[in-house]
Image (cartoon, helix red, strand yellow):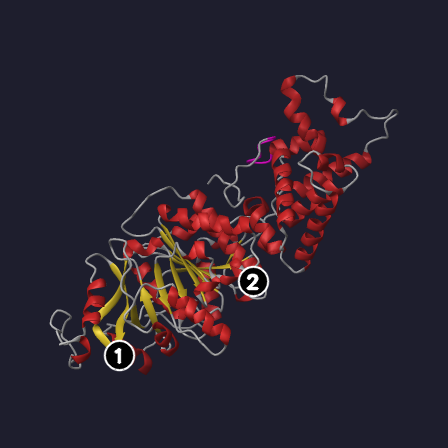
Amino acid sequence: MTDSEAPPAKAPEGVSGAPALPRPVLEIASGYAFTGPALDLGALLWDGRCLPDVQIRIPLPMLNRHGLVAGATGTGKTKTLQLIAEQLSAQGVPVFLADVKGDVSGISAPGQENDKVRTRAGEVRQEWTPAGFPCEFYALGGMGHGIPVRATITSFGPVLLSKVLQLNQTQEQSLGLIFHYADQKGLELVDLKDLRAVVTFLTSDEGKSELKGIGGLSTATAGVILRSLTAFEAQGMSPFFGEPEFDTSELSRVAGDGRGTVSVLELPAVQDKPQLFSTFLMWLLADLFHDLPEVGDVDKPKLVFFFDEAHLLFNDASKAFLDAITQTVRLIRSKGVGVFFVTQTPKDVPGDVLAQLGNRVQHALRAFTPDDQKALKSTVKTFPNSPYDLEEVLTALGTGEAVVTVLSEKGAPTPVAATRLRAPESLMGPVDPAALDRAVQASPLYGRYAEAVDRESAYEKLTEREAQAASSPAPSAPAEPASSRGRGRKADDQDSSVVEQVVGSGVFKSLARSLGTQIGREITRSIFGTARRRR
């Protein structure tokens, strides 16, 4: 008897006892019959019916092989993230979630049972129990309800900052030279006014000689960078850069009961600044990358990072930026970190990055326009061979349904499976703002990061130098050029003389007092140009 001649399947008591199921269904079922720990996604959909005995799962050790959650608006991507995050937390894995729409905070509170939840749980044979999960809430620069997340300009680095400032490739390279100069001269770039002060100095009459000595940076390009910084500040971006800088190791915390902490970064307040928040997320990932030790293949991930609205990261990105993303995604797996990109269609993600994503949860796509139809065909081509007519299935999926393929315990792709997904057990919506504020202020991290600190850095040092120059009496004779003033000095004074050319002897003393400053030593930077910090 062929598959098409097989009688309709009854409600089977188990896959092994269901010979009436078509052969493709049995093959799919065997592809997801994992023996080790796994996350439960839902039940198989076949021929318009939900088969609860065929459970679709993701092996826990494969979560650091990265993934993609895609689908049109309103198809249930956010609830899929919530479902996966809950189960990761329950198995002791910390999770990072970017909350772009402001509705993920409910993961901290038990869900509310209703007819829809009961129906879905019955369809997929889920033992649904309301549960909240340990959470920390963050907000970029304190714009929102969460604990402020800030980065110093030095740590952010020239490559990521160029993306935020929308600089072209030449300007990006020039900004890198400016960072190189500041590193060498011991001018700490903590916030935007520090970088603006350094660029202003380099474009001044006094600083032009310095400008010529750092690789041919033109005055015109420096001026463009300065204008971009000024416009950036005028848009209210200053709060995102400064101190205390957020320590990304906080994202890897485990609660006292052994569950992984879910770190929710609230982004609704910066929805109109997409370049900023997408690039800031990349900074978090890059900082984790160069701080975490190599661990190789692990029984469960050290952290799973969900990168929402991923297309914003790749829009108008330079080749250097895309190369750095690809390298980070490729290498961070060996540090036990899994990265899931969340976007509308796979074509939003460059091919080199997409090739690194072993787990796929594809929600419904629309095909209303020729462009939609082209995107649909392109998406179908990214899946392994399948008994489904994927063009038809992907346009017919309902909310909370998806086409799934993951990596098996052996690292091979599993069969493509249309899936009716489980219902999250936490609250599917935002928590009350007052409750959220109470949770934030009760966090042990609140006192560490809540108040901004403005210590002495490049702006103050250059301002002090300018004030000293203005108050100094005019010399009776023309001063010797800087290049000849130090010729007679001893060799062991050469390093300090380099700094004095920039900041003056008075500021040199303050530099020596600054914690962590190493005069004349350039900061070591990662593939993104982000500074390597000592914890």
The disc at residue 9 is: none
Based on the picture, tell me whether residue 518 belongs to the magenta stretch: yes
Residue pictured at 85% horizontal, 30% vertical: 473
Residue 255 seen by the camera: no
Kind of residue indicated by mark 1: Asp
Nearest to N terminus: mark 1 or mark 2: 1
| Residue at the (15%, 70%) spot, across then down | 15
Up/down of 279 relative to 334, above or below:
below
Q: Is residue 354 left or right of residue 194?
A: left
Residue 331 percent location from the top left of the image: 40, 46
Magenta residues span 514-520
Residue 275 visible: yes
Mark 1 and mark 2: Cα distance apart in space: 40 Å
Instruction: Look at 87% across and 24% down and name the residue there.
Output: 477
For label 2, the SS is helix
Residue 47: mark in rendering: 1
Q: Position of residue 204 (x, y in %)?
A: 77, 41
Q: Is residue 206 on the magenta stretch?
A: no
Q: Secondary structure at mark 1?
A: loop
Q: Quadrant of the N terminus?
A: bottom left
- 117 or 276: nearer the viewer: 276
Mark 1 Cα-neighbour bin, 10 Å: few <14, some 14–19, many ≥20: few
In which quarter of the view is residue 415 placed?
Answer: bottom left
List x then y, in percent, for residue 476. 88, 25
Is label 1 or label 2 in front?
Answer: 1
Residue under pointer 2: 274
